[in-house]
Structure formats: structure tokens, C-alpha cells
Image: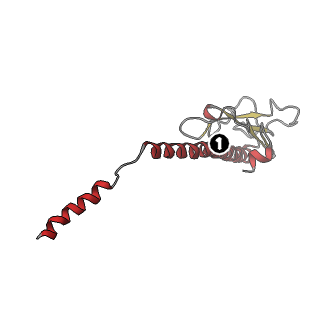
Amino acid sequence: MENLKQRPNAINRRGSSYQAGVTLIELMITVVIVGILASIAYPSYQTYVAQANRSEAKGILLETAQFLERNYTTNNCYHRTDAACATTTTTVALPFATSPKTGTAKYNITAVYNADLAAACATTGQCFTLSAAPTGSMTGDQCGTLTLDQAGRQGAGGTVANCWQR
């Protein structure tokens, strides 16, 4: 019977010397480590998001160029809806005005037709240049305005290879 009485006391003695919880120093070290990891990861995350937004804008530019090519096949003109490409006919509306297609705009999509590209395009209705101008959170992007013309030439405010090939 004495052994049973001593046993709970032995358990209590071991339990009383055990430290429970976290010290302030341990907590501060953890906060510093998390802060260092976040300061390294956040810029990489921002770069990834910018590349994803740029990729979506490039996709919309390519999709819009295909739309204009289909119009050219039907009407022998990129920007009008009649076969003679007369200036009195309604201009074809672009399928998308922003990138992304829904939600907060990151790029504004516009088209310039040969009326404004007279030096580069001798025949009426035969030229276009699509532009994706950064707006909102993409303002100040290193690639600037992305462009695409009827010949498939790609342009950018930055290095074309870096901006279009990624």
C-alpha cells in the first residue's frame, strides 16, 4: 500500500519540473525567421503574378488578331464589315477591351488600323496594330505596352524577347 501512495507523488514531482509553453525568445526567433522567409518570397511572388498577367494579355492579343484575320477572310478588310472596306460601314468591334476578360483590368486592349498607319500600309484595310497598355496593378510594368500587328510582329516597351517569350 505504501508503494501506491508514493507513486502519485513521484509522478507529481516529475510533472512539476517539466516546463510547459514557449518562451518570449523562442517566439521572437520564430517571428524573425518567418519575416526573413517572407521578405525573400514576396518579390518572387510579385514577379510570378506580373508574368501571369502579361501572359493573359498576350493570349488576348493573339485571340483578337485571329478574330481580325477571320474578318479579313470574310470581308477582305480587317476593320470594316463590308467587302469593299468602305469608310461608311461600321467598324468591327473588338471582342475584348481589357485583360483579363472579366474582373479588374490589368491591360487595356486597343486596335489601330491603317488610317493611322498610312506610312506602313499602302492599301486601305490591310493593316492593324493591336496594343495592350498596362493599367491598374500592372502600371509601371517593365514590359510596358505589348503590341502585335497583322504580320505577327511583336513589340513591347521592354526587351521583346523577355516580354513575349516567357
Toward the front, the furthest residue is: 2
Q: Is residue 32 left or right of residue 9?
A: right
Describe the element under mark 1 as helix, strand or loop: helix
Scheme of colours in the image = secondary structure
Image coordinates for residue 46, horizontal then vertical, percent: 62, 42
Q: Quadrant of residue 111?
A: top right
| Residue 116 coordinates in the image, percent (x, y) | 80, 29
Residue drawn at the location 74% of the way across and 48% of the way down: 73
**Which quadrant would residue 79 be assigned to in this image?**
top right
* Residue 27 percent location from the top left of the image: 45, 44
Q: Quadrant of residue 18?
A: bottom left
Q: Residue at x 54, y 46 (%)?
A: 33
Residue name at image x 67 percent, y 43 percent: 54
* Residue 152 is at least partly visible in this image: no
Q: Quadrant of the N terminus?
A: bottom left
Q: Position of residue 128 (x, y in %)?
A: 77, 38
* Residue 20 seen in this snapshot: yes
> 29 or 14: which is nearer to us?
14
User: In the rendered image, which residue does mark 1 sit on?
Assistant: 50
Q: Is residue 151 above or below residue 123?
A: below
Report the front residue among 103 and 83: 103
